Image (cartoon, coloured by chain):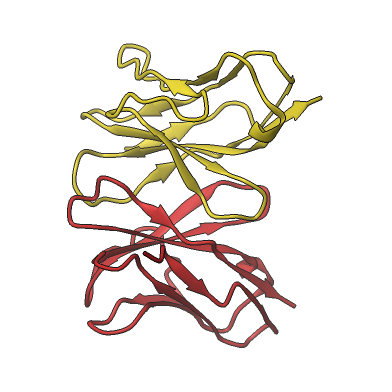
């Protein structure tokens, strides 16, 4: 029973490039959450998605960031035209319908050079 | 507004000493409170949730609604307890986002 799978684990991008982070939730989970962890800081909520729907994107920066969770395939967090300040660990989490327990992935570490 | 405050960014104690990591929350309804632990550059793992009232790895936490606190305690710290600890809040049952505190880095000295 695989947990939340994220890839890539580490990603290096030059300023101005695009970063795509993928998250496969726990099998059977239909709710996905993305969090960002800046160096030496806590986790900040970014977006909450269900299949094909964005439920809450109150934590998403207004520009350059987008997220999707299609009917088939993993959830994708996309960052366009990356800047140095985007360097962080991006954690994905998932839960089932009851939402009682939220499971986290191992994170994707983005470094912008 | 939902808010979780962990006043101590760093906490260092000696092995065998008691540990208390503080967590205060702000929420007008009936929240669900959690403690997550993150070992170096690994995924967050659920340590405790207040509604289950269980003890994991010797840690306990009691929800005090009067003081709006959910402090994490362990009577005798062990070196393997060194990690980052996050207190988190969920505004009720069902699938909802977690709001995290800033985290406390616990270091257990030998």
Q: Nearer the viewer, residue B101 or B81?
A: B81
> Relative to B86, is A10 on the left or the right?
right
Q: Tell me where residue B2 appears, x and y as whole percent.
A: 34, 37
Q: Tell me where residue A105 appears, x and y as whole percent.
A: 47, 61
In which image quadrant can residue B38 be found? top right
Q: Tell me where residue B85 appears, x and y as whole percent.
A: 56, 37
> Relative to B41, is A97 on the left or the right?
left
> Relative to A84, is B50 on the left or the right?
left
Residue drawn at point x = 39 percent, y = 54 percent: A103
Quarter holding the C terminus of chain A is bottom right
Q: Nearer the viewer, residue B9 or B86?
A: B86
Residue drawn at point x = 22 percent, y = 77 percent: A52
Quarter holding the N terminus of chain A is bottom left
Residue most toward the right?
B110
Q: Nearer the viewer, residue B87 or B109?
A: B109
Q: Which chain is yellow?
A: B
In which image quadrant can residue B48 be found? top left
Would you place residue A52 above or below residue B12 in this image?
below
Residue drawn at point x = 22 percent, y = 73 percent: A51
Count all numbered tags in the image, as a single digit. Answer: 0
Residue drawn at point x = 52 percent, y = 19 percent: B73
Q: Tell me where residue A90 appears, x and y as whole percent.
A: 53, 64
Residue most toward the bottom?
A17
Would you place residue A15 above or below residue B62 in this image?
below
Q: Which chain is red?
A: A
């Amino acid at each position: 029973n695989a947990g939340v799978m994220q890839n890539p684990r580490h990603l290096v991008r030059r300023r101005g490039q695009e970063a795509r982070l993928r998250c496969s939730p726990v099998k059977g989970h239909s709710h996905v959450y993305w969090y960002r962890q800046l160096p030496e800081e806590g986790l900040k909520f970014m977006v909450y998605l269900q299949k094909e729907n964005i439920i809450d994107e109150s934590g998403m920066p207004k520009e350059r960031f987008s997220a999707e969770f299609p009917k088939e395939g993993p959830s994708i967090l996309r960052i366009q035209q990356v800047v140095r300040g985007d360097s962080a660990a991006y954690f994905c989490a998932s839960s089932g319908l009851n939402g009682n327990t939220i499971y986290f992935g191992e994170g994707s570490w983005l470094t912008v050079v | 507004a939902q808010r979780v405050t962990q006043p101590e960014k760093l906490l260092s104690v000696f092995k065998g000493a008691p540990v208390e990591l503080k967590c205060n929350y702000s929420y007008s309804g009936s929240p669900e409170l959690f403690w997550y632990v993150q070992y170096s550059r690994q995924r967050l793992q659920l340590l405790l949730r207040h509604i289950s009232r269980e003890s994991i790895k010797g840690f306990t936490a009691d929800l005090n609604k009067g003081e709006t606190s959910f402090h994490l305690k362990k009577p005798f710290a062990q070196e393997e307890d060194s990690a980052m600890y996050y207190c988190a809040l969920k505004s009720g049952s069902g699938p909802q986002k977690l709001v995290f505190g800033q985290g406390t880095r616990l270091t257990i000295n030998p």
